[in-house]
Image: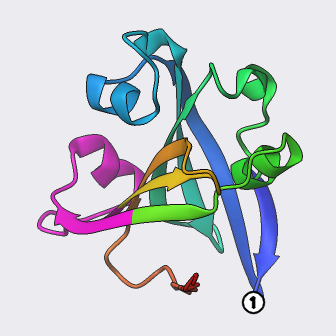
Amino acid sequence: MHPDRVDGSSVANGKLEVDRGSGDDDVGYLGIPANPSAITECVRLRCMDEEPIAIETLRLSLARHPWLNDVDWDTSVHQALEDHGTSPARADVFVDVVEPDSEQRRLLQLVEGQSLLRVTSRTSDSEGVPVSLDEIAYHPAGRARCHHTRRVVG
Protein backbone atom coordinates (compact mmCIF):
# COMPACT_ATOMS: atom_id res chain seq x y z
CA MET A 1 0.00 0.00 0.00
CA HIS A 2 1.12 3.53 -0.76
CA PRO A 3 0.06 5.87 2.06
CA ASP A 4 -0.75 9.56 1.61
CA ARG A 5 -1.80 12.18 4.15
CA VAL A 6 -5.22 13.83 3.96
CA ASP A 7 -6.39 16.21 6.70
CA GLY A 8 -3.90 14.63 9.11
CA SER A 9 -5.08 11.09 8.36
CA SER A 10 -3.04 8.41 6.65
CA VAL A 11 -4.78 7.17 3.48
CA ALA A 12 -3.64 4.09 1.56
CA ASN A 13 -4.74 1.91 -1.36
CA GLY A 14 -3.81 -1.74 -1.55
CA LYS A 15 -4.33 -3.78 -4.70
CA LEU A 16 -6.23 -6.98 -4.02
CA GLU A 17 -6.43 -8.29 -7.59
CA VAL A 18 -6.19 -7.23 -11.22
CA ASP A 19 -8.04 -9.26 -13.81
CA ARG A 20 -8.81 -9.16 -17.52
CA GLY A 21 -12.40 -9.56 -18.57
CA SER A 22 -15.71 -8.40 -17.19
CA GLY A 23 -19.46 -8.70 -17.69
CA ASP A 24 -21.40 -7.72 -20.80
CA ASP A 25 -22.89 -4.61 -19.17
CA ASP A 26 -19.41 -3.25 -18.46
CA VAL A 27 -18.22 -3.98 -21.98
CA GLY A 28 -21.24 -2.20 -23.44
CA TYR A 29 -20.75 0.95 -21.38
CA LEU A 30 -17.03 1.14 -22.08
CA GLY A 31 -17.67 0.87 -25.82
CA ILE A 32 -15.90 -2.39 -26.54
CA PRO A 33 -17.74 -4.56 -29.08
CA ALA A 34 -18.00 -8.18 -27.89
CA ASN A 35 -14.49 -8.42 -26.47
CA PRO A 36 -14.63 -8.68 -22.68
CA SER A 37 -10.93 -9.60 -22.47
CA ALA A 38 -10.24 -5.96 -23.37
CA ILE A 39 -11.44 -4.86 -19.91
CA THR A 40 -9.09 -4.48 -16.96
CA GLU A 41 -10.70 -4.83 -13.56
CA CYS A 42 -8.81 -3.86 -10.42
CA VAL A 43 -10.09 -4.41 -6.90
CA ARG A 44 -8.42 -2.33 -4.18
CA LEU A 45 -8.82 -2.06 -0.41
CA ARG A 46 -8.86 1.57 0.71
CA CYS A 47 -7.71 2.34 4.24
CA MET A 48 -7.60 5.41 6.48
CA ASP A 49 -5.30 5.38 9.50
CA GLU A 50 -4.77 1.67 8.82
CA GLU A 51 -8.51 0.95 9.16
CA PRO A 52 -10.27 -0.50 6.09
CA ILE A 53 -12.90 1.99 4.88
CA ALA A 54 -13.89 0.74 1.42
CA ILE A 55 -13.44 -1.77 -1.36
CA GLU A 56 -13.01 -0.15 -4.75
CA THR A 57 -13.54 -1.91 -8.07
CA LEU A 58 -12.31 -0.11 -11.21
CA ARG A 59 -13.10 -1.26 -14.75
CA LEU A 60 -11.29 0.36 -17.67
CA SER A 61 -10.84 -0.36 -21.37
CA LEU A 62 -7.49 -1.80 -22.45
CA ALA A 63 -8.36 -0.74 -26.01
CA ARG A 64 -8.47 2.89 -24.90
CA HIS A 65 -5.77 2.62 -22.22
CA PRO A 66 -3.19 0.00 -23.33
CA TRP A 67 -0.70 1.36 -20.77
CA LEU A 68 -2.87 -0.15 -17.98
CA ASN A 69 -0.81 -3.34 -18.21
CA ASP A 70 2.08 -1.42 -16.65
CA VAL A 71 0.26 0.84 -14.16
CA ASP A 72 1.03 0.76 -10.43
CA TRP A 73 -2.45 0.04 -9.06
CA ASP A 74 -1.41 1.05 -5.53
CA THR A 75 -1.18 4.70 -6.63
CA SER A 76 -3.75 7.15 -8.00
CA VAL A 77 -5.43 5.74 -11.10
CA HIS A 78 -6.97 9.14 -11.88
CA GLN A 79 -3.50 10.69 -11.86
CA ALA A 80 -2.28 7.94 -14.21
CA LEU A 81 -5.22 8.67 -16.53
CA GLU A 82 -4.34 12.37 -16.56
CA ASP A 83 -0.65 11.58 -17.13
CA HIS A 84 -1.71 9.62 -20.23
CA GLY A 85 -3.96 12.36 -21.60
CA THR A 86 -7.36 11.22 -20.31
CA SER A 87 -9.14 13.32 -17.73
CA PRO A 88 -12.49 12.14 -16.40
CA ALA A 89 -14.75 15.20 -16.73
CA ARG A 90 -18.14 13.77 -15.82
CA ALA A 91 -19.46 11.03 -13.56
CA ASP A 92 -22.97 9.63 -13.45
CA VAL A 93 -23.27 8.38 -9.89
CA PHE A 94 -25.68 5.82 -8.44
CA VAL A 95 -25.88 5.23 -4.67
CA ASP A 96 -27.51 2.28 -2.93
CA VAL A 97 -27.22 0.11 0.17
CA VAL A 98 -26.23 -3.54 -0.30
CA GLU A 99 -25.56 -6.58 1.81
CA PRO A 100 -21.86 -7.54 1.83
CA ASP A 101 -20.66 -10.90 0.62
CA SER A 102 -18.38 -12.95 2.88
CA GLU A 103 -15.17 -11.52 1.35
CA GLN A 104 -16.33 -7.92 1.78
CA ARG A 105 -17.37 -8.70 5.35
CA ARG A 106 -13.92 -10.14 6.08
CA LEU A 107 -11.93 -7.35 4.40
CA LEU A 108 -13.92 -4.51 5.96
CA GLN A 109 -14.13 -6.26 9.37
CA LEU A 110 -17.92 -6.11 9.43
CA VAL A 111 -20.21 -7.78 11.91
CA GLU A 112 -23.29 -9.71 10.86
CA GLY A 113 -26.14 -7.41 9.86
CA GLN A 114 -24.05 -4.43 8.71
CA SER A 115 -24.77 -3.20 5.19
CA LEU A 116 -22.55 -1.30 2.78
CA LEU A 117 -23.09 2.05 1.11
CA ARG A 118 -22.26 1.38 -2.55
CA VAL A 119 -21.40 4.19 -4.94
CA THR A 120 -21.26 3.27 -8.63
CA SER A 121 -19.87 5.82 -11.10
CA ARG A 122 -19.71 5.83 -14.87
CA THR A 123 -17.07 8.37 -15.82
CA SER A 124 -16.51 9.98 -19.20
CA ASP A 125 -14.14 12.55 -20.64
CA SER A 126 -15.03 16.05 -21.86
CA GLU A 127 -16.08 14.60 -25.24
CA GLY A 128 -18.50 12.16 -23.58
CA VAL A 129 -16.33 9.11 -24.31
CA PRO A 130 -16.52 6.53 -21.46
CA VAL A 131 -13.42 6.32 -19.27
CA SER A 132 -14.29 3.91 -16.46
CA LEU A 133 -16.93 2.11 -14.50
CA ASP A 134 -16.15 2.38 -10.78
CA GLU A 135 -17.76 0.89 -7.69
CA ILE A 136 -16.85 1.71 -4.11
CA ALA A 137 -18.45 -0.20 -1.22
CA TYR A 138 -18.01 1.82 1.99
CA HIS A 139 -17.77 0.57 5.57
CA PRO A 140 -20.96 1.66 7.38
CA ALA A 141 -19.48 2.71 10.72
CA GLY A 142 -18.46 6.23 9.79
CA ARG A 143 -14.79 5.45 9.18
CA ALA A 144 -14.87 7.43 5.94
CA ARG A 145 -15.35 11.14 5.43
CA CYS A 146 -16.95 12.34 2.25
CA HIS A 147 -16.34 15.59 0.39
CA HIS A 148 -18.49 16.22 -2.66
CA THR A 149 -17.81 18.95 -5.20
CA ARG A 150 -20.46 19.69 -7.77
CA ARG A 151 -19.62 21.74 -10.83
CA VAL A 152 -22.45 23.12 -12.89
CA VAL A 153 -21.58 23.76 -16.52
CA GLY A 154 -23.52 26.23 -18.62
Disc 1 residue type (three-letter): Asp
Quarter where residue 34 is shown: top left
Measuring from the top left, give residue 147's x and y in whole percent.
56, 87
Q: Is residue 23 visible?
A: yes
Q: Nearer the viewer, residue 136 or 87?
A: 87
Q: How is the image coloured?
A: rainbow
Examine the rendered structure and indicate whether residue 20 appears above or below residue 65.
Answer: above
Residue at the front extreme of this rendering: 154
Residue 145 at what x, y percent from top left? 52, 85
Residue 66 on image: x %, y %: 73, 20
Instruction: Locate the C terminus and report the quarter of the image it occupies.
Output: bottom right
Q: Quadrant of residue 99?
A: bottom left
Give the magenta range.
Answer: 93-119
Instruction: Give the residue pinned by disc 1.
Output: 7
Q: Is residue 48 above or below residue 72?
A: below
State the SS at label 1. loop
Q: Is residue 25 above or below residue 38?
A: below
Q: Residue at x 64, y 47 (%)?
A: 14
- Would residue 99 appear left or right of 72 to someone viewing this image? left
Q: Residue at x 75, y 89 (%)?
A: 7
Q: Is residue 110 within the magenta segment? A: yes
Q: Nearer the viewer, residue 59 or 28?
A: 28
Residue at left 49%, top 79%? Answer: 144
Taking the view exactly as shown, the residue that stands out farthest to the left is 113
Answer left or right for 85 relative to 115: right
Whether residue 117 is visible, yes or no, is no
Image coordinates for residue 29, horizontal then vertical, percent: 38, 36
Left or right, 45 with respect to 68, comes to left
Residue at the location (79% across, 62% down)? 3
- Tell me the crowding category of disc 1: few under 14, some 14 to 19, or many 20 or more residues within 10 angstroms, Cα based: few
